[in-house]
Image: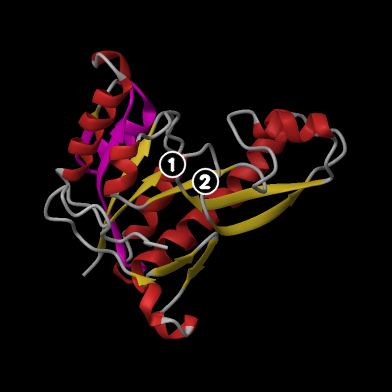
Amino acid sequence: MSARLVVLISGSGTNLQALMDASADEAYGAEVVAVGADRDGIEGLARARRAGVPTFVVKLGDHPSRAEWDEALCAAIAAHRPDFVVSAGFMKILGPQVLQAFSVVNTHPALLPSFPGAHAVSESLAYGVRVTGCTVHLIDAGVDTGPVIAQETVPVEDGDDEETLHERIKIVERRLLVEVVGRMARYGWTVTGRHARLGRPEDSGDRSQSQHPGRPEALDRPETGRSTK
């Protein structure tokens, strides 16, 4: 049975498209069951609708406080009973209710912990690094501070500007995200402190900390699919 994914977006949805394309193969092990956004009228929502995937929009400005927005977003995600959540270009910081209820995977266009935040590519160029890359990580309460699952390098070429470098990073980022999400769906993952590992439980030699996708029946089961260490 395929793992159920809810994907959160804020823009064109190219990472979303890569996940939907991968999930067309039953062997991939995961299915995008819903797409959520923080605003209307974006191409990512149109991509989902063309593919017949349910969508929802939870706008921050429609709620009196960020805490109430977080509660509404959590409820909207939970309605689709995901095994885990993928933040694929979602430009809002997720709150404690969402993070307590679901494991959330994110991509970042730099090699964390270097250059966290929304301006990673421009800051990498300004610093003068010769190698950058992308990171797939689990989201925690900080800004790009969650346990790293996978990283891949991208060289900075002479003459690169923010646009050209970011486009090359995105190519690697899409592939790495698809690979990581598929392995999480098929084999589970472990998290011990800051160390995240993908693979079958027997591969890690520590079955006690193995996490596998699980479908929470209600929000009073916050630790489903999450490490407790």
Give the mark nearest the N terminus, 1 or 2.
1
Q: Which numbered tag is attached to residue 179?
A: none
Circle 2: is it few (<14), some (14-19), or many (20+) Cα within 10 Å? many
Q: Whole-Å distance between the Cαs marked 1 and 2?
A: 7 Å
How many numbered badges does the structure rendering display? 2
Tell me the quadrant of the picture where the C terminus can be found: bottom left
- Kindly indicate whether the residue at mark 2 contacts the one at mark 1 (C-beta within 8 angstroms): yes
Highlighted magenta segment, given as a residue range: 28-56
- Residue 186, percent across and down? 35, 71
- Residue 121, percent across and down? 68, 34
Tell me the quadrant of the picture where the N terminus can be found: bottom left
Position of 198 with respect to 72 (left or right) is right
- Which residue is under mark 1? 88
**Three-letter residue code for mark 1:** Ala
- Residue 203: within the magenta? no
- Which residue is under mark 2? 107
**Quarter-wise, where is residue 163 in the image?**
top right
Residue 108 versus residue 24 in the image, above or below: above
**Three-letter residue code for mark 2:** Thr
Q: Nearer the viewer, residue 145 or 176?
A: 145
